[in-house]
Image (cartoon, rainbow, N blue to C red):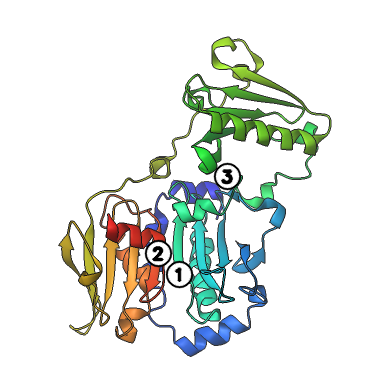
């Protein structure tokens, strides 16, 4: 199926089998599968980030030189290995799967499955996370000190080792503050160029940086750094920095923006924090059922080790898995959250699955707020 067809079938992934994922898979089978996955060899042995891309159902290594660069047509798995205490050798883990807005159902379904498999490989120690393009969690963004870059299409379209004369023009949008400036490729349309942000028009042999009147210093600095990297890769490319007030309508920058704008649909508006809702997952009736427990302020005393709970805070969703919950309740945290979010106005927010006893700053902050 082409990327265009995936785009046309908008939100097809909402109705995928993610909600049912894991419900019929035995733990032993998962573990046997995990230990035979070549990609997991050495995973979690040392502090740092490791990234894989899903290619035709296979887990493939993503080059370290491209960490922080993602394609909207692909799905990825990201493992963060860290030490909770500098005085201890004990390691802890966060494992994320990232879904590009044009990633196929096969790709993100495989990414979801393999994320749980990696969790099993690491003896259920990681905190699991789902990330969707345009709605990434603060934790995910914190991994990439140079910011997040999202390009259109799939990795096969390439952005490295391309001759400037053969380079496909790209318009890059820089938006954010401090270390969380996100770089996103957008259509070559003039309507996309906004006063509040910074843009780079990359024509291969000529590169323009356009600074909007209301853009901030972080966006400008990130764009300047990005532009210098592009120039060093190209060798003979020329660049020019433009200020909005001094850039006239007949400038080559504007003349190159001839494409028709294509809306980003639901991927364009990150959700914001809202009223909290706490739901309990139970199989007491012989089947899995989600029941709302309360809304408003939620504290630790609202959680019971015998059950699984979903805490929805509007811009992030947490699944808390009690140690004494039944096996049926434990086995599909991502699916429960997915099932709940599909009934809300914010289905694409980050999901984190936290087992009782694990630490997660965002979850702790949600309880404290």
In the foreground, 183 or 146: 146
In the foreground, 51 or 356: 356
Res. 352 mark: 2
Q: Position of residue 336 (x, y in %)?
A: 32, 69
**Earlier-in-chain disc, 3 versus 2:** 3
Is residue 233 shown left or right of residue 350? right
Which class describes the residues within 10 Å of circle 3: few (<14), some (14-19), or many (20+)?
A: many
Res. 59 mark: none
| Residue sticking out furthest to the front | 87
Is residue 240 shown left or right of residue 129? right
Element type at marker 3? loop
**Earlier-in-chain disc, 2 versus 1:** 1
Residue at the image point whose x is 56% and y is 75% from the top = 88
- Among the 4 quarters of the image, the one containing residue 87: bottom right
Q: Where is residue 39 in the image (x, y as percent from the top left)?
A: 66, 73
Q: Contact (CB < 8 A) between labels 3 and 1?
A: no
Q: Where is residue 325 in the image (x, y as percent from the top left)?
A: 29, 83
Element type at marker 1? strand
- The residue indicated by pointer 3 is 147
Whether residue 201 is visible to the viewer of this picture, yes or no, is: yes
- The residue indicated by pointer 1 is 127
């Amino acid at each position: 199926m082409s990327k265009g067809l995936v785009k046309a079938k908008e939100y097809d992934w909402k109705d995928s089998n993610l909600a049912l994922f894991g419900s019929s898979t035995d733990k032993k089978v998962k573990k046997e599968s995990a230990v035979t996955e070549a990609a997991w060899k050495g995973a979690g042995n040392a502090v740092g980030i490791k990234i894989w891309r899903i290619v035709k159902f296979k887990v493939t290594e993503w080059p370290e030189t491209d960490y922080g660069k993602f394609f909207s047509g692909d799905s990825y798995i990201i493992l963060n290995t860290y030490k909770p205490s500098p005085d201890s050798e004990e390691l802890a883990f966060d494992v994320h799967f990232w879904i590009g807005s044009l990633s196929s159902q096969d790709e993100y379904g495989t990414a979801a499955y393999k994320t749980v498999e990696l969790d099993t490989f690491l003896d259920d120690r990681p905190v699991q996370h789902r990330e969707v393009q345009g709605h990434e969690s603060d934790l995910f963004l914190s991994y990439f000190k140079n910011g997040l870059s999202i390009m259109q299409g799939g990795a096969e379209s390439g952005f490295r080792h391309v001759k400037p004369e053969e380079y496909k023009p790209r318009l890059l949008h820089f938006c954010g503050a401090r270390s969380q400036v996100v770089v996103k490729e957008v259509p070559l349309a003039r309507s996309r160029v906004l006063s509040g942000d910074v843009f780079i028009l990359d024509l291969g042999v000529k590169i323009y940086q356009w600074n909007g009147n209301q853009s901030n210093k972080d966006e400008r600095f990130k764009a300047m750094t990005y532009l210098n990297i592009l120039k060093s890769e190209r060798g003979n490319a020329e660049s020019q920095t433009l200020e909005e007030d001094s850039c006239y309508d007949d400038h080559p920058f504007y003349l190159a923006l001839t494409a028709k704008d294509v809306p980003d649909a639901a991927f364009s508006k990150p959700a914001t924090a809202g009223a909290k809702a706490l739901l309990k997952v139970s199989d007491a009736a012989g089947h899995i059922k989600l029941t709302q427990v309360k809304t408003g302020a939620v504290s630790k005393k609202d959680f019971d080790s015998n059950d699984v709970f979903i805490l929805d805070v509007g811009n992030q969703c947490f699944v808390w898995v009690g140690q004494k919950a039944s096996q049926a309740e434990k086995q599909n945290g991502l699916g429960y959250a997915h099932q709940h979010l599909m009934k809300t106005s914010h289905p694409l927010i980050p999901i984190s699955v936290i087992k009782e006893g694990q630490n997660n700053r965002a979850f702790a902050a949600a309880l404290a707020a």
